[in-house]
Image (tube, coloured by chain):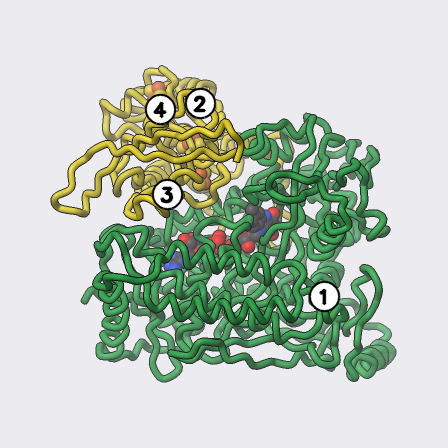
Amino acid sequence: MSDNERVLKFQVFRYNPQKKSDKPRMVTYEVTEAPGMTVFIALNEIREQQDPSLQFDFVCRAGICGSCAMVINGQPTLACRTLTSKYESGEIKLLPLPGFELIGDLSVNTGKFMRAMSERVESWIHDIHADQVDYNKLEERMDPDVADQIYELERCVECGCCVSACATKRMRPDFLSAVGFMRLARFALDPRDKRTDEEFYEIMGDDDGVFGCMTLLGCEDYCPKDLPHQTQIAYLRRKMVLVK
Amino acid sequence: MKVIYTDSLVIGGGLAGLRVAIASMQRGYDTIVLSLIPAKRSHSAAAQGGMQASLGACIKGDGDDEDIHFADTVKGSDWGCDQDVARMFVNTSPKAIRQLAAWGVPWSRVRAGDREVVINGEKVTITEKAEAHGLISARDFGGTKKWRTCFTSDGAGHTMLYAMDNKAIQMGIPVHERKEALALIHDDGICYGAIVRDLITGELMAYVAKATTIATGGYGRLYSVTTNAVISEGIGNAIALETGIAPLGNMEAVQFHPTAIVPVGILTTEGCRGDGGLLLDRDGYRFMPDYEPDKKELASRDVVSRRMTEHMREGKGVPSRYGDHLWLDIRLLGRKHIEKNLREVKEICEYFLGIDPVEELIPVRPTQHYSMGGVRTRATGESPALKGLFSAGEAACWDMHGFNRLGGNSVAETVVAGMIVGEYVADYCAANPLNISTTTIEHFMRQEEKKITDLLLRNHGENPFQLKAEMQKIMMDKVGIFRNGPDLEQAVEELKSLNQRARNIALRNRISSSNPELVEAIRVPKMIKLAQCVAYGALLRTESRGAHAREDYPERNDKDWLKRTLATWKEGSDLPDISYEELDVMKMEMPPGSRGYGVDNIVHHPDTKKRISQIETVREANPGADRFEMQELLNPITIPEKFKGKNERIGRGFK
Ligand SMILES: Cc1cc2nc3c(=O)[nH]c(=O)nc-3n(C[C@H](O)[C@H](O)[C@H](O)COP(=O)(O)OP(=O)(O)OC[C@H]3O[C@@H](n4cnc5c(N)ncnc54)[C@H](O)[C@@H]3O)c2cc1C
Ligand code: SF4
Ligand code: SF4
Ligand code: FES
């Protein structure tokens, strides 16, 4: 280890709703920093060496799966790819992502929220022929640029950062949120999806949908995949205004 | 006792599990998927590279077909695969990818006209055909004759998994998240579902089903440094092993990927080298052409990993505080290409290494990556020993990969196996009534309850995190890329003693609900058993084949070892029982030959010559036979009716 290694102070939100007597509190843990240390590495070290009851969620630990979003020093982000060296003071405060059901400590139920979102926006290709497609024949052609553009909007990893950063969502519990808008924009762009604008209007043409959005753009600021929320929300609004 | 009944229980919500679930649901069977995590977070999402299917639309894939894909796959496996399964696979993969296109995957498409690519370190211009415009494109990957790996920019696995899960949601398939299968329920050689723990409440439940499918992914986390997700712990394999009946196949076949970043082991995709990236040593020298003048950086994975290790052993590695490594150089691909087709790689470099790969070299080292072994199945996906138990995807040893799988063949396997095995699962549901006594269910429930109560009551004992770390270190140091007798013997002994210690785990946090330490305590003994299967299988296999490289037995020995390792576990024993299943040379469409890497030191099987001349005779006797008729004569396969059609390609039709 080098001479200038420092001791990091983690302040971590602790609360286990499964335990009847438990109360929310902040607990401090000290960890000796190692080169290249991420919040993922530090949390595992705390769990293994100091407190085996500490709950958090990691899967890919590479910024790919969207499991590990939490609020780090006030900002929602992916913990697995956050280097501790980023924080000069050496103090790191961790809170669970707000806006989701708390499972325990830093673990929240984004899965349940995202499944409901997918059901609500009907996150699939609407085409009665999609199941009859003859897969022995050449696939339907697609413009290479269109394919690339769809992918750009499909890069969302359902991490929930945009939801937790959204002021409207805090006031309106049923607000669809940026992740839902992004999904709708992705399908609206896709020539394989045969839904009409009127059908999209049914899903998002009210105040819990795109008309409720105050365009404060917390979503765009905190999306770890840098998705173009501003342009897509504006696009959906224009599209929806034209329907009525 | 909470009991949930269904027809088709699928353990695992990755690509393979979801596709099996879709198949059984489409056939009208009640289906439930279990997953440790939300399905879209499964490790399938991490596949950045792509999926192999011989569509032959892009110019560098021109002339490709099932036969060439078949030959690459069999060679890649070092003749260790099941050739009938490899055949089913290559013939169905084009259908799988086209179906996914209809379900929403935005595959990258061919753009007509000139484009610049990097081949063998040089910039060259290739011209895509006008008539191919808009069809699914492909990139180059290691060990393949043609550019066959179809991709979506840098997110093939992500887009495939999202399309698949969206399809499952559309069909209303329930995915029970944060649930862990702990044991299979079985009686008299028939499997009836699983005992499952809710990871939030800690509640134990019985999921009782006609057919049970294990699609739980790989067991990379037996090793301390791996590209795999933290949940790739092989628990699905372990619960099959613990039945004492269902065998695991070829557990010693473990693949190391050449290019994971140092030290954390996160993967940079094979697409880096496929698209033209190079490997350099401490002197900035491109060394692969010296070892493999023909395929260079794009030799098969196992070969490149070994060459890199050899080169570092010769002192050519770059020293670092985390040990030696080599460099991956993608600078020559240019910013535009990297930011579009290798963006995930760029992000990983920025976030985890603090470097920009457009301008800097990436520190890489071969790292555990893929599990060829798994639940042994027949070509139908069913266990040969335990009726009603099926397996698909990385968890299975369906065995199209033998001792080394090709890049891009794995996500392809998950979907193709999902389609084919899914049909057989549905057939099984149709043919078998659910006949199980509550006493049997209760027996398994009590058994799991007792294990957990014992853990919660024990005052003193072993720390599960520590046992796991010790196991991972043994695997890394002694059962790695190069293996030898003395190291493997030590590994087997040390793992045996870990196995004994694992019977005495005690917890610091003694609650039965949501408790990460309890999860660890339940899993670690299972993982140690798997590690023992890997190490013991590797010790007994005194030859080198594919990813299993014995320094003391460098030759591939077809005479004695053209066979698949089967491991079963007797309760209470401290080593697996190992037996073998012969591969029948006389049934091979492609008799054993050389892969064309390094020196040819094969000890041939006595039947190889016979089979070659037999094939010659068949060819001569059927001069008019086309390639489909020839395959029928040499390697007749049974495949569900819906997948029998021929595949269309541009400029070639259905020929
Ligand atoms: C970094 C990386 C990159 C890769 N890139 C490529 C590539 O470009 N091309 C390619 O072909 N292959 C690639 N692979 C390999 C390929 O991605 C995997 O082999 C494949 O996706 C595995 O899919 P699966 O459905 O079998 O399992 P997974 O996707 O791993 O899913 C396993 C599922 O099982 C569930 N599960 C596990 N245990 C239990 C349990 N006990 N109870 C309940 N549920 C359980 C999990 O929750 C999960 O849903 C890559 C692999 C890695 C690690
Ligand atoms: S722009 Fe603001 S209100 Fe609208 S979705 Fe984004 S964060 Fe929410
Ligand atoms: S849109 Fe961005 S912030 Fe929102 S869930 Fe998707 S990836 Fe996360
Ligand atoms: S663990 Fe997958 S994004 Fe962080």
Decide which of tag 3 and tag 2 comes sooner along the chain: 3
- In space, the residues marked 3 and 2 are separated at their CA atoms by 26 Å
Which color is chain B depicted in? Answer: green
Subunit of mark 2? A
- Disc 1: which chain? B
Q: Which residue is mark 2?
A: A229
Q: Are marks 1 and 2 on the same chain?
A: no
- Amino acid at circle 1: Glu
- Residue A110 pos. (x, y %): 33, 39
Disc 4 C-beta below 8 A from ligand 4? no
Looking at the rendered image, the disc whose residue lies closer to the viewer, 3 or 4, is: 4
Q: Which residue is mark 3?
A: A57
Marks 1, 2: nearer the viewer: 1
Where is residue A71? Give x, y as percent.
Answer: 34, 29
For discs 3 and 2, the disc positioned in front in the rendered view: 3
The chain letter of the yellow chain reads A
**Rendered-image quadrant of the N terminus of chain B:** bottom left
Residue B551 — which label?
1
Determine the residue positioned at 33% across, 77% down.
B433
Q: Does the closest atom of ligand 2 sit within 8 Å of the Cβ of label 2?
A: yes
How far apart marks 2 and 4 lie (CA) works out to 23 Å
Quarter-of-image position of residue B477: bottom right
For mark 4, what is the residue?
Answer: A73
Which residue is found at the position 41% from the left and 38% from the top? Answer: A42
Front-most of residues B176 and A207: B176
The residue nearer to you, when weighing A71 against A192, is A71
Q: Is residue B316 visible?
A: yes
Marks 3,4: beta carbons within 8 A? no
| Identity of the residue drawn at 71% across and 61% down | B76
Considering only vertical position in the picture, is B21 above or below B262? below
